[in-house]
Amino acid sequence: MNGGPSGFNNAPVTKTFVIACALFTVFFGIQGRSFKLGLSYQDIFRKLSIWKLIASVFAFSSTPELMFGLYLLYYFRVFERQIGSNKYSVFILFSIMVSFFFEVMALAVLKDPTANLLTSGPYGLIFASFVPFYFDIPVSTWFRIFGVRFSDKSFIYLAGLQLLLSSWKRSLLPGICGILAGSLYRLNIFRIRRAKFPEFVATFFSRLSWPSAGTPPTAPARNLAGNVPYTTRQVERTYPSATAPSAIEPPEDSIATLVSMGFDRNSARQALVHARNDINAATNILLEAQSH
């Protein structure tokens, strides 16, 4: 399964967040303070520690958590491409704030002042992203290993499970709180899915996020519900019908995979026809059409 075009093309908010997580983790690691990361009952209710609150949003407490966490954040950039940077910024803020609220409630119930009960890192955002991943990202391939059936989504679930159990109880609780936050977002509580920041917020992240090597120029964010800059005419103009192969109706799951990346359904179908149902080639066709 593909998270869309490689790199952070059309995902400036994700890029900024990933860089921030890496920098915070390295900073605390160099200072030898990684073992102090994490939240306890005392940090919230007895001696409020602001630096711990900020660090708990970005910094992972160990290298394995950093690797799996950044991998998942990088993959989930597909959601920014689907709904746009503005709404994805709302999703990030909502996930972090709501999951943090649940974490504070859990600390209030457990009332253990002697231990850091919650590990550090953007667990709320990562595990909130598993909710749309489960419901909205289609399975494109199935395969078997030693008689056990897996899908291309299984690797993402396995990475999430590894992160969820990385610190056992300390990571399990933030992960569950993140799933609850993602579920509330999907239920559109307080109509949160319609909320948007002022446009300068997305523009700020676009300017802050410098181009990556080999990454095509960014274009306006694409939305599954519409407002997509790709048209059938663009695809046909890039690959004229005279040289196009004979039309073979593309599989529905291939069309759904391209749509999940943010491409228009009709354009995705035309690209698959031109690419002889090769999904990677079809993606290149759509990206080439973008640049015209």
Image: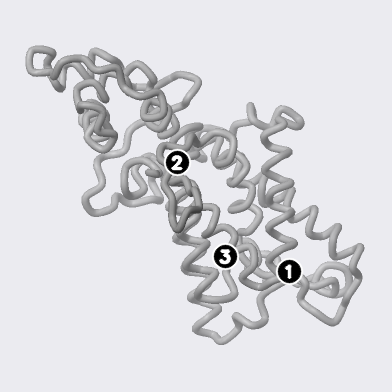
Residue 164 badge: none
Q: Amino acid at mark 1?
A: Leu
Counting from the top left corner in percent of width and height, residue 276 is at 20, 26
Q: How far apart, in angstroms, are the residues tagged by discs 1 and 2?
A: 28 Å
Real-space Cα distance between discs 3 and 1? 16 Å
Judging by the rendered image, the residue that carries numbered circle 1 is 118
Q: Quadrant of the C terminus?
A: top left
Q: Secondary structure at mark 1?
A: strand
Give the foreground label among 3 and 1. Answer: 3
Point out residue 220 in the picture as x, y percentages from the top left corner: 37, 30
- Residue drawn at x 61%, y 65% as measured from the top left: 121
Three-letter amino acid code of the residue under disc 2: Val
The residue pinned by badge 2 equals 78
Question: As displayed, is residue 142 above or below residue 191?
Answer: below
Residue beneath the point at 31% across and 22% down: 250
Find disc 3 in the rendering and name its residue. 162
Identified at 44% across, 39% down, the residue is: 203
| Rendered location of residue 215, percent (x, y) | 26, 47
**Mark 3 residue element:** helix
